[in-house]
Amino acid sequence: RNGLEVLQELRRNRVVAPAIMVTAYGTREVEEAAAALGIKELVAKPFELSRFLEAVKKTLASDQGRQVIHALVADQGLLSEEIFLKFSQVASVSRVVSLGEARRELSSSKINAVFIDELFPDRGELVALLAATFPGLPAVLMQSGKGRVAGFRHTIRKPLRVEAMRHLLKELP
């Protein structure tokens, strides 16, 4: 497998880690695929060691002090793999499709943000659970339309965009 395939598999498994891509194939297509997986530094072969070290320093500097977000995503099982790849660029993600799974995940993991799809069948019950048991835990509604929904101080519009997710995560307590 190539590096993009390995990184894509890591992102699919919700592994969030900074990455630098070293490639002999610096085509626009490869650059776009790398960017979609969260790679900010791409080093073309052959390269000078100083260029590689510069990329390492920039990558480490951009990630220093970054709080790792452990997000719980509650959806009805219909969100695409593409959306989870986007989430994996900004957070470590656990996905649940039922209220029971959400309860188990919330009690066993260090979750610091909950994203709930507007079509999640137990949305009201999950919001009530969060308010009663985890009052400081931010809940974000993922919705297609505009407007406020009771129980949510934060919303994000679908289709999800990585920059919008990064911006929202910076605003969360």
Image (cartoon, rainbow, N blue to C red):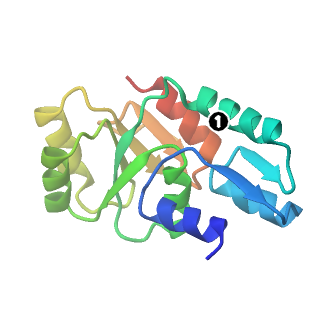
Residue 57 lies, in percent from the top left, at 67, 30
Report the residue at 82% width, 38% height from top.
Answer: 51
Report the residue at 28% width, 65% height from top.
Answer: 97
Residue 130 lies, in percent from the top left, at 19, 39
Residue 81 visible somewhere in the drawing: yes
Report the residue at 49% width, 52% height from top.
Answer: 88
Quadrant of the rendering where the N terminus is positioned: bottom right
Q: Is residue 43 left or right of residue 165?
A: right
Residue 75: quarter of image: bottom left
Closest to the observer, 71 or 133: 71
Label total for image: 1
Say which residue label 1 marks: 59
- Work out which residue is located at the far front of the displayed protein and give it: 49
Residue 59 lies, in percent from the top left, at 65, 35
Residue 50: quarter of image: top right
Report the residue at 67% width, 56% height from top.
Answer: 36
Q: Is residue 82 left or right of residue 91?
A: right
User: Within 10 Å of the Cα at label 1, are there few (<14), some (14-19), or many (20+) other Cα atoms?
Assistant: some
121, above or below 73, in the image: below
Residue 167: quarter of image: top right
Q: Is residue 70 left or right of residue 22?
A: left
Quadrant of the rendering where the C terminus is positioned: top left
24, above or below 113, in the image: below
Residue 144 visible somewhere in the drawing: no
User: Which amino acid type is shown beneath numbered disc 1?
Assistant: Thr
Closest to the observer, 34 or 49: 49
- Work out which residue is located at the far bottom of the displayed protein and give it: 1
Which secondary structure lies at badge 1? helix
Q: Is residue 46 left or right of residue 112?
A: right
Residue 69 lies, in percent from the top left, at 40, 37
Closest to the observer, 31 or 52: 52
